[in-house]
Amino acid sequence: SWNKLVAGDVANLEGSGSVFEVDDANDELRERCTALDIHPTALLWGDGCDTNAAPAGHDDWLQALGKARVQPAYRSLRLRVVDLRWQVDKDTLTLNFGLTRGAFATSVLREIANTTDFVSRNNPTEIQHESP
């Protein structure tokens, strides 16, 4: 899961590249995960990864990553947005926020602006698309 730890997960310590395997998702680790101090991760495939565990249909990509000697790595499945502030002036929304090293503001903005899924699930007949 993207927001809960289970035994066997690899977790990331907030604000660092440090990762560790979760042997036991005990109360302390679950509390730290809830507090955004540690995060579940996902593997970025690279050279030496077990291709038997790879998602089906991506053999070409895995071979290319191996050939290029791309090193595998783990990345957090979530990120902490800090000091979020906003201001609205007429037709302009200005956002200010901080992120940890390695996080991208464009990812945050995409999630803020992506309302289509929510709208389509809750009001499927009210979706209107404007032509460019």
Image (spheres, helix red, strand yellow):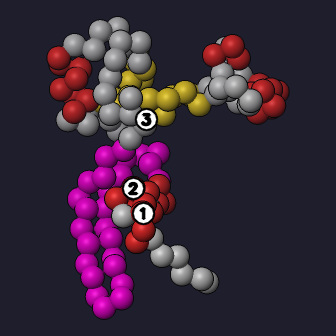
Q: Residue at x 31, y 68 (%)?
A: 96
Q: Nearer the viewer, mark 2 or mark 3?
A: 2
Mark toward the start of the polypeptide (2 vs 3): 3
Residue type, label 3: Ser
Disc 1 to disc 3, C-alpha distance? 32 Å
Residue 46 visible from this viewpoint:
yes
Which residue is label 3 attached to?
Answer: 76
Side of 37 where 129 appears, left or right: right
Q: Position of residue 77 (x, y in %)?
A: 43, 37
- Residue 124 badge: 1
Residue type, label 1: Pro
> Label 3 neighbourhood size at 10 Å, few (<14), some (14-19), many (20+)?
many
Q: Residue at x 48, y 76 (%)?
A: 128
Residue 65 visible from this viewpoint:
no
> Label 1 neighbourhood size at 10 Å, few (<14), some (14-19), many (20+)?
few
Residue farthest toward the top in the current orientation of the protein = 23
Q: Which residues are magenta?
A: 79-104
* Magenta stretch holds residue 85: yes
| CB-based contact (under 8 Å), mark 2 and mark 1 | yes
Q: Position of residue 30 (x, y in %)?
A: 22, 23
Q: Quadrant of the C terminus?
A: bottom right
Q: Which one is in front, 118 or 42?
A: 118
Name which quarter of the figure residue 90 lies in: bottom left
Disc 2 to disc 3, C-alpha distance? 27 Å
Residue type, label 2: Arg
Dot 1 falls on a residue whose secondary structure is: helix
Which residue is label 2 attached to?
Answer: 121
* Magenta stretch holds residue 78: no
